[in-house]
Image (tube, coloured by chain):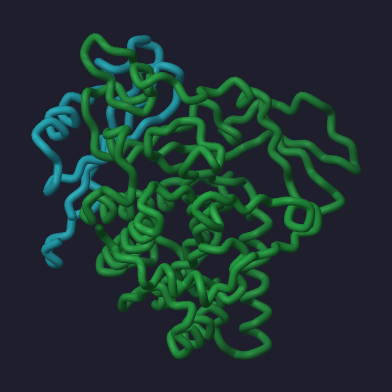
Amino acid sequence: MSELRWNPTLEEWVITATHRQDRTFFPPPDYNPLAPTLPGGFPTEIPANDYEIVVFENKFPSLRYPAPEPSIDPTGLEPVVPSEGVCEVICYTPDPTTELANLPLRKIEELVYVWADRFEELSSREYVKYIFIFENKGKEIGVTLSHPHGQIYAYPFIPPIAERELNASRRYSEKNGSNLYEDIIQQEMNDGRRLVSANDHFIAIVPFYARYPFEVHIIARQPVTAIVDLDDVGKIALASILKTTISRYNNLWDRSFPYIMVMHQRPCNSSASEYDHYRFHIEFYPPYRTPDKLKFLAGSEAGAGVYINDTHAEVTAETLRNTPDSR
Amino acid sequence: MKIVKKIITKEDGRELTYYHFLDSASESQQRAFESVDATEIALNSREVSSANTRTIHTLGDANV
């Protein structure tokens, strides 16, 4: 049972999804639901004995359409509505032992095309307002299935963080007459201390305002505001800088590096020009601050929304810049 | 990049999309994609929907 409950104190929706309490939790290898279905084997989510990339609706979705009626009656103070939307799982490799960073560049390019296709497909549904593409990687993040995969949440509203970014960039543009992200890119390219890597279409930085020690933002250098705006060269450039970034993460301490990867873009059913004050970008939130210490979201972060970073972006950016792409 | 996709409806009504990349698929993946068929996959005939196959992108000029 899932529903959207309105929080009037923060003016935001909360999704309750009680059926997710019993979702699949680290199944044994023979019962991997994201593997291909082999002859005589356990029937997985993918009814074929091999695949390249498959995308399917989550078996334990937080959002679905049509959505069931809420379990509780709304009040004027605390509305509750059906949790309409779409939750998808993207399986981009049939190999449960690998990860995105280890895939050939070609395979990551193909994934970028799939992301763009999902944006286009889900945007066509009138109840969808925002496409959120992301990946949770690592037990430390709370992943319950170790087979490498990403997800898409197609929300029926613009989520709070996206809304803050869109509004902030609009206000900046109205005040300064320029694009906030373009100005950030120019500053970082000129400064260099927080630069991790760059190509003609993207820049990867540890932002000046990084909240996590090894937080990286990959920002489009061209005026694109959604993944569907990327042309073929742009998609390939995105795949390249993604592979560089996540490979360096793994090579930092010679082990698989957990992170949350999120894609921030304009709302769907909008035009690029409508949001030309904004810029398509991807953010990484890795939880480790040292090889053996996690950064926890404690009182200041969770209760006040004020992050405390134990490092300086200039230091961690230099570390990542000096980390090889391959070993 | 030449991509084809098939969309099927699973037994429980959820949609699944297979993406097939013509230029990079292995023989096993090629055979698997060709084997995808809604009639064969949907065990419950009430939930069978026609497999929807279409080319979503063809990149002829960039040679990638």
Q: Residue A19 falls in which quadrant of the image?
A: top right
Q: Residue A312 falls in which quadrant of the image?
A: bottom right
Image location of residue A73, percent across then percent down: 84, 28
Where is the N terminus of chain A found, in terms of image quarters?
Answer: top right
Where is the C terminus of chain A found, in terms of image quarters?
Answer: bottom left
Q: Residue A90 falls in which quadrant of the image?
A: top left
Q: How many marks?
A: 0
Q: From the viewer's perspective, is A254 left or right of A142?
A: left
Q: From the viewer's perspective, is A123 left or right of A102?
A: right
Residue at 24% across, 33% down: A51
Residue at 38% across, 51% down: A115
Image location of residue B32, percent across then percent down: 17, 28
Chain coloured green: which letter? A
Residue furthest front as drawn: A292
Residue A63 vertical placement versus A278 (above, below): above
Q: Foreground residue, A302 or A20?
A: A302
Residue at 84% across, 34% down: A74
Image location of residue A76, percent across then percent down: 90, 41
Q: From the viewer's perspective, is A79 left or right of A84?
A: right
Q: Chain B is drawn in which colour?
A: cyan
- Kindly tell me whether residue A224 is visible in this rendering: no
Q: From the viewer's perspective, is A321 left or right of A214?
A: left
Image location of residue A116, percent across then percent down: 37, 54
- Kindly tell me whether residue A62 is visible in this rendering: yes
Q: Foreground residue, A72 or A186?
A: A186
Q: Foreground residue, A120 or A93?
A: A93
Residue at 51% across, 38% down: A139
